[in-house]
Image: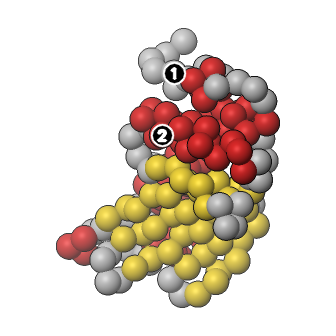
Amino acid sequence: MSLIEQSFSTEIHPIDLCEHLCEHNDWEFDRVADDQIAMAVEGQWRTYSITLAWSDYDETLRLICTFEMEPPQDKLPQIYEVLNRANDQIWTGAFTFWPEQQLMVYRYGLVLSGGQVAGAEQVDHLIGAAVGAAERFYPAFQLTAWSDQSPEEAMDVAIREAYGRA
């Protein structure tokens, strides 16, 4: 049994669980409300802002991972194309761009209907998947916004997921 599993063997509110994971990983965080937490997770390319919120209404743990991106207006069609290409390569979550806030956003909702309980490993994986997806596609987003490369060419630099063992 891992350290995380030992620490969270009893039922715990999903946001309490997130708070404990932040403490365990030494991530900066702010408990915004009883049902919401915001954190900063350092990646290779940048620091990502992650917010997790619990909704009793639809029994969903919502994750939003954002980072600033200010592409030139004339590059927005290419940005949307590279977003579509990135979304075609990931199975969980999806990217979008919020032009008003100049934010690139990765969103995911973990449905826990019927009284299901999120485990520490599950939430840790959720946060890791968000940061992993942002890290994987960040170079493609940047190349699309700031170079003369097409979205297709920019996607060639996206880090490919590896399967199996070395």
* Picture coordinates of residue 2, whole percent (x, y): 51, 49
Q: Quadrant of residue 32?
A: bottom right
Which residue lies under the disc numbered 2?
84
In the figure, 7 relative to 74: above or below? below
* Picture coordinates of residue 74, whole percent (x, y): 71, 45
In the figure, 82 relative to 49: above or below? above
Residue occupying the point 67% across, 67% down: 100
Q: What kind of element bears circle 2?
A: helix
Q: Which mark is residue 85?
A: none
Q: Amino acid at mark 1?
A: Ala
Looking at the image, what colour scheme do you see?
secondary structure
Q: Amino acid at mark 2?
A: Asn
Q: Which mark is residue 162?
A: 1
Q: Quadrant of residue 59?
A: bottom left
Q: Residue placed farthest to the left in the image?
A: 114
Question: Badge 2: few (under 14), some or many (20 or more) residues near its Cα, within 10 Å?
Answer: some
